Amino acid sequence: MICDEIYEAINDPDDDGTRVNYIADEFRGERDAIEILELLNSSDSELISIGAWILDEICFDKYKKKGEIIFRLVDLCSHEDSNVRYSVLGALYAVFEVDKQFARKILGKMRLDVDEGVRNSVQLITEKLSLYKE
């Protein structure tokens, strides 16, 4: 199970992040991205953030059950932990590039986030995608 793999890696005092990167490499390769839903559905904010980071690292075309993954990522945009919200923005970026209306909807809600880092990220994404210049 992916949660167990990641949990062991991040709690290994002798590991410098190599194991998590190795797992991410497996998803960049042939490992099915749907497994990441287990991380996204975790109650542990760190596991959720790592899952979102891995999704940000892999090609969006690799997602099977894209709708299920995207639905969960959207739900996480209102997570109590700002690190999760920040990580989710990166994971959703590929969707934002393809669907500007979707991007405006999600980023419009997040532009007033209580966390300055999340707000700054929303602003950068909005500018990069030229969302309000069309």
Image (cartoon, rainbow, N blue to C red):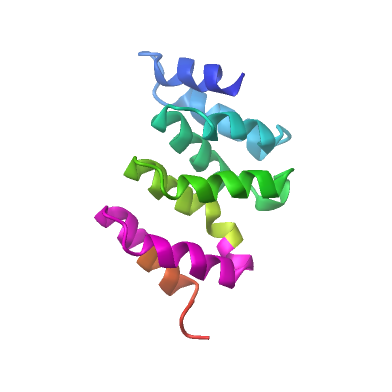
Residue at point 65%, 50% (across, down)? 59
Q: Is residue 18 positioned above or below 127 on the image? A: above
Residue at 66% of width from left, 51% of height from top? 60
| Residue 8 point in image, percent of width and height | 47, 15
> Residue placed farthest to the bottom in the image?
134
| Mark count | 0
Q: Is residue 111 magenta?
A: yes
Is 130 in front, or is 57? Answer: 130
Give coordinates of residue 114: x percent, y percent. Answer: 26, 54
Q: Nearer the viewer, residue 80 or 47?
A: 80
Q: Is residue 64 left or right of residue 134?
A: right
Query: Residue 34 location, x and y as percent?
Result: 68, 36
Magenta span: chief secondary structure: helix
Q: Which residues are magenta?
A: 96-121
64 sits to left or right of 108: right
**Among the 4 quarters of the image, the one containing residue 5:** top right
- Residue 13, picture quadrant: top left
**Residue visible at 48% across and 52% down in the picture:** 90
Q: Position of residue 122 (x, y in %)?
A: 39, 63
Instruction: Determine whether, in the image, residue 100 is placed left or right of residue 62.
Output: left
Answer above or below: position of 112 versus 65. Answer: below
Does the magenta portion include 118?
A: yes
Specify the quadrant that holds the N terminus: top right
Residue in the image at 41% along x and 48% along y: 78
